[in-house]
């Protein structure tokens, strides 16, 4: 998570309540592993896009903020659209409640096993809400996405592909008797809806209010998932 001085005023175009992005530019010629350099570029791009808007941001400025030459930046990303799409892929891909494993196919899931999966999912999801980059990237998507259909086309398809995979897995869990047939198994997007609500709260409300509400929202989210996915016991 980037360290951002809270005393600085928000940059133009930055979402309300978010910490301002780092203002300093990186020194050039620092040798970094490829994944660290990529993250550094995306952090720089998030700053430039948030401050200037996608249309006014320049690859030269992204490169300078990341401590690269323009040629060095193009060695990692072929275009500004590619940078924008990679930024979305890094921060806004949906987590999966059941990962790549079906929910104990063939037998009803023991209560503690289902609860463990739900708790792990919620841990990962709500931890992301503490990363300022996640909130600012979401704000950027809402502000710029409708004007950039080509830039987000790949991200959108990847996002939908993951949701379709999870939807199929949940339906399989219902068919195998591992999950209760409910609104959540009909539309997997409802599993993620409270997380989006929490992100919007962080965007629009002050930090103190968000911190007071989020624990209660998470607890209600947990109850919703367990109530709607756990098969009812015998009377």
Image (spheres, rainbow, N blue to C red):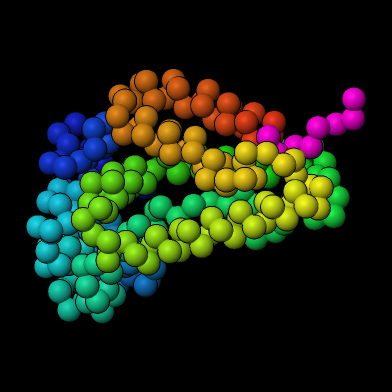
**Which quadrant holds residue 87?**
bottom left
217 lies above or below 138: above
Q: Residue drawn 16% across and 42% down?
A: 13
- Give percent across and percent down for residue 108: 83, 45
Q: In the image, is residue 42 part of the stretch drawn in magenta?
A: no
Of residues 149 and 162, the one drawn nearer to the viewer in this rendering: 149
190 lies above or below 70: above
- Give percent across and percent down for residue 131: 39, 43
Lateral position of residue 224 relative to residue 195, left or right: right
Of residues 11 and 171, the one drawn nearer to the viewer in this rendering: 171
Q: Which residues are magenta?
A: 228-235
Of residues 145 and 80, the one drawn nearer to the viewer in this rendering: 145
Q: Residue drawn 49% across and 35% down?
A: 194
The dominant secondary structure in magenta is loop
Lateral position of residue 24 relative to residue 220, left or right: left
Q: Residue drawn 43% across and 33% down?
A: 198
Of residues 100 and 191, the one drawn nearer to the viewer in this rendering: 191
Lateral position of residue 121 relative to residue 158, left or right: right
- Give percent across and percent down for residue 45: 23, 58
205 lies above or below 8: above
**Which quadrant holds residue 61?**
bottom left
- Give percent across and percent down for residue 14: 20, 41
8 lies above or below 67: above
Residue 67 seen in this snapshot: no
Lateral position of residue 161 relative to residue 235, left or right: left
Q: In the image, is residue 232 part of the stretch drawn in magenta?
A: yes
Residue 223 seen in this snapshot: yes
Q: Residue drawn 15% across and 67% down?
A: 59
Tell me the quadrant of the picture where the C terminus can be found. top right
């Amino acid at each position: 998570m980037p360290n951002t001085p809270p005393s600085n005023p928000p940059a133009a175009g930055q979402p309300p309540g978010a910490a301002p992005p780092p203002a300093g530019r990186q020194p050039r010629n620092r040798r970094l592993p490829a994944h660290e350099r990529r993250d550094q570029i995306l952090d720089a791009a998030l700053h430039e896009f948030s401050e200037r808007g996608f249309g006014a941001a320049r690859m030269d400025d992204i490169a300078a903020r990341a401590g690269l030459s323009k040629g060095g930046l193009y060695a990692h990303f072929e275009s500004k659209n590619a940078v924008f799409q990679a930024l979305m892929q890094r921060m806004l891909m949906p987590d999966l409640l059941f990962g790549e494993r079906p929910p104990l196919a063939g037998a009803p899931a023991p209560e503690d096993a289902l609860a463990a999966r739900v708790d792990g999912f919620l841990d990962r999801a709500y931890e992301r809400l503490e990363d300022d980059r996640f909130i600012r990237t979401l704000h950027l998507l809402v502000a710029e996405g409708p004007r950039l259909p080509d830039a987000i086309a790949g991200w959108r398809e990847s996002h939908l592909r993951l949701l379709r995979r999870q939807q199929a897995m949940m339906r399989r869990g219902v068919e195998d008797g591992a999950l209760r047939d409910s609104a959540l198994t009909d539309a997997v997007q409802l599993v993620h809806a409270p997380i989006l609500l929490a992100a919007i709260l962080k965007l629009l409300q002050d930090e103190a209010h968000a911190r007071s509400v989020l624990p209660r929202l998470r607890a209600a989210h947990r109850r919703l998932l367990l109530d709607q996915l756990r098969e009812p016991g015998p009377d």
